[in-house]
Image: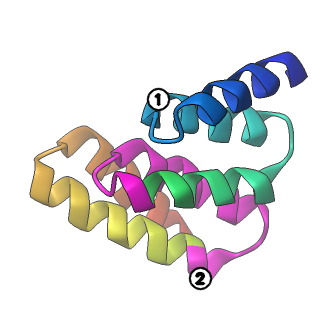
Amino acid sequence: MSARIDALTAMLAQDPANTFARYGLAMALLDSGRAEDAVQEFNLLLEKNPDYAAAYFHGGRALESLSRIEDARHLYQRGIEVTTRTGDAHTRSELQAALDILG
């Protein structure tokens, strides 16, 4: 996993605006147990591209893994607003289900 993280980090050093690489890095960090670092990458991604729907779902999951439930709830709610506006019904339903689980 470290090689993947290193490769994505190098890609971002060349092109910090590469949303695909930023999302890939956030997911690789999350998969390797580095949830706090993943949250930072998801936040950077959403700052640059607030319509990147999957980042709301996986960012929320990363926050949940850190027991930051209120932050996760807020991120899911923001994602629901975005996916409602953009018409992404599939991701919206995933975000709603995650939010419902939190109660």
- 33 relative to 13, above or below: below
Q: Residue at x 28, y 51 (%)?
A: 51
The magenta region covers 47-71
Nearest to the observer: residue 29 or residue 74? 29
To which residue does mark 2 refer? 70
Q: Residue at x 42, y 43 (%)?
A: 54
Instruction: Find residue 50 and name its label.
Output: none
Secondary structure type for disc 2: helix
Give the labeled residue for mark 1.
20
Magenta-colored stretch includes residue 34: no
- Which of the two residues, 87 or 38, is positioned nearer the viewer here? 38
x and y percentages locating residue 16 in the rendered image: 53, 41
Residue 29 falls left or right of residue 77: right
Q: Residue at 46% across / 69% down in the picture?
A: 75
Dot 1 falls on a residue whose secondary structure is: helix
Q: Position of residue 33 (x, y in %)?
A: 86, 43
